[in-house]
Amino acid sequence: MRPLLTSQATRAVQDGDLGEMLALVQLAASGDPGATRRFLDIIRKPLTRMVTGILGANHADLDDVIQKSLLAVLRALGAFRGECHPIGYASRIAMRTALHARKESAMRRGRVQSLAQAAPCDREIAWPIEDLANDRRKRALRDLLSELPREQAEALGLRVVLGWSIEEIAAAMGSPPNTIKSRIRLAKEALRERIEADPTLVEGLEIS
């Protein structure tokens, strides 16, 4: 049997063990309203944390993406086979939803900025931007997650955003711990390559 989630993920389950959680998922997948509400109550906090970690707390579409993530999890329950912890399953879906939203948002910003540069203007427009002095390291990590191979992004995101252990991530992703360590190592190497031109970004981005 794969190891259960033991820290933050376990606390999110509150008073239910894995067997109860799996039974709850089955009921929710069958359309039981009470089970669906209970399941959403359990996963809402970790999913909110995941989406906020990917998009940032000030992202204009944050609430909308959180709701999309919850709906995406409900739609995917029929495909859940109990091979990992339900919270891990839900968190990975939320991460994919948030990464997709971040990519779409970046494309929209690019189009708007291109139009602004092409349009004649009598005065400079003050475009709203994030506070780079405070958020540049977080933004570098979020941008990287959008560019990494999916499995590396998921492993790094679960490690950094939710603070899960290697064993918890392995259980959620259905992969051996050594494989998870390798994915995180490759993701960290990609991160270092991305920021090596700006050494000030290194501080605060060390991942244990």
Image (cartoon, rainbow, N blue to C red):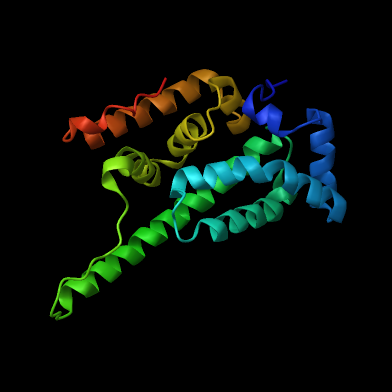
Q: Residue at 74% of width from left, 46% of height from top?
A: 41
Res 32 visible: no
Name the quarter where the N terminus is drawn.
top right
Vertically, is 160 above or below 24? above
Q: Is residue 191 above or below residue 166?
A: below
Image position of 14 (left or right of 182): right
Left or right: where 98 falls relative to 3: left
Q: Out of 116 and 72, give the one closest to the viewer.
A: 116
Q: Is residue 73 left or right of residue 159?
A: right
User: Which image quarter is the C terminus in?
Assistant: top left
In which quarter of the view is residue 207 placed?
top left
Q: Residue at x 30, y 49 (%)?
A: 131
Q: Residue at x 79, y 51 (%)?
A: 37
Residue occupying image coordinates x 81% and y 30%: 15
Relative image position of residue 135 (x, y in whole percent): 33, 43
Instruction: Give the percent coordinates (x, y) of residue 93.
Output: 58, 47
On the image, the x and y values in percent for residue 161 come to 49, 35
Foreground pick, 181 / 121: 121
Task: Look at the image and tell me whether residue 51 can be seen.
Answer: yes
| Residue 68 vs residue 180, the one in the foreground | 68
Could you tell me how many numbered marks the image carries? 0
